[in-house]
Amino acid sequence: GGGFKKFCRGEIQVTGASRHIKSTEAEKCEKAGIKFVELAIAYDGISVVAHPSNSFAKHLTVAELKKIWEPAAKGKITNWNQVRAGFPDLPLKLYGPGPDSGTFDYFTKVINGKAQASRADYLPSEDDNVLVRGVAEDKGALGYFGFAYYVAHREKLALIAVKNGDGPIVSPSTKTIADMSYKPLARPIFIYVNVDKAKDPAVDAFIKFYIANAKGLADKVGYIGLPPEI
């Protein structure tokens, strides 16, 4: 979200995006005379994580995630024993991306039914490293952020699988994200390019480098490179 604001004001030539551009953002670009192209560059999954000592929440359903994160949960769903019968009496502490994050937009849309619809009483940060640290240090923690950050810090976190409706319980992995079976938290990620600025030789060279190297670099840092045909 923060990147699109700058992009549609013409302040930057390229923006990364972990969701599609919104119609309202596209309208702002159009009014500013900015034409753009969307380029998919990798797949990513959103990891749901807990403190490493959490041995009871092996998986959560999409309905349970909604129960935890929807706006109506503010000040009401504050203990793990309210999430599911049999969960312990343990204060629930939540960590997640802030409202400028595309991950926040995507998660709230697919879990709560509307982008940006979220309870406000959680610790937000656009810096996923802050979220990793918060979850890793709080026994009652539950958080979400990109799969790459889980991969980089897996020894500090407990990964929670997700059950979508009547579907199977699925954990995020390079395979389940690439084949999109990790529903609904697998997604493509993009860069958006200002078409007029792409005529600049430096921008043109950067985009060509990006596309040529995206798969190899994505795989190294915990994203999943696109198959060659895409």
Image (spheres, rainbow, N blue to C red):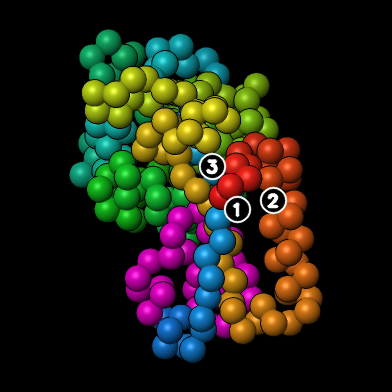
Q: Can residue 142 be seen?
A: yes
Q: In the figure, residue 59 lies in which quadrant?
A: top left
Which numbered disc flags the more N-terminal residue, 3 or 2? 3
Task: Quickly name the residue at label 1.
Answer: 41
Q: Which three-letter amino acid code belongs to the residue tagged 3?
A: Asp
Residue extent of the magenta highlight? 1-27
Q: Which is closer to the viewer, label 1 or label 3?
A: 1
Q: Residue at x 38, y 66 (%)?
A: 22
Q: Label 3 belongs to which residue?
A: 44
**Which of the 4 image quarters holds residue 184?**
top left
Question: In this image, 122 relative to 36: left or right?
Answer: left
Q: CA distance from mark 1 to mark 3?
A: 10 Å
- Name the outermost residue toward the front: 229
Marks 3/2: CA–CA distance: 13 Å
Q: Residue at x 30, y 29 (%)?
A: 164
Residue at 74 percent across and 55 percent down: it is: 212
Q: Residues within 10 Å of mark 1 (few under 14, many from 20)?
A: many
Q: Is residue 202 above or below residue 229?
A: below
Helix, strand or loop for disc 1: strand
Measured along the vertical axis of the image, is residue 143 above or below residue 218? above
Task: Give x and y (percent) for residue 167.
Answer: 29, 24
Q: At 67% across and 78% down in the image, what residue appears? A: 198
Q: Is residue 162 left or right of residue 215?
A: left
Residue type at tag 1: Ile
Where does residue 119 sit, x and y in percent of width and height?
Answer: 31, 47
The span from disc 2 to disc 1 (Cα, nearest Å) is 6 Å
Q: Around disc 3, counting alpha carbons within 10 Å, would you say few (fewer than 14), some (14 to 19), or many (20 or more)?
A: many
Task: Give the SS element for disc 3.
Answer: strand
Amino acid type, residue under disc 2 in the picture: Ala
Residue 214 numbered tag: 2
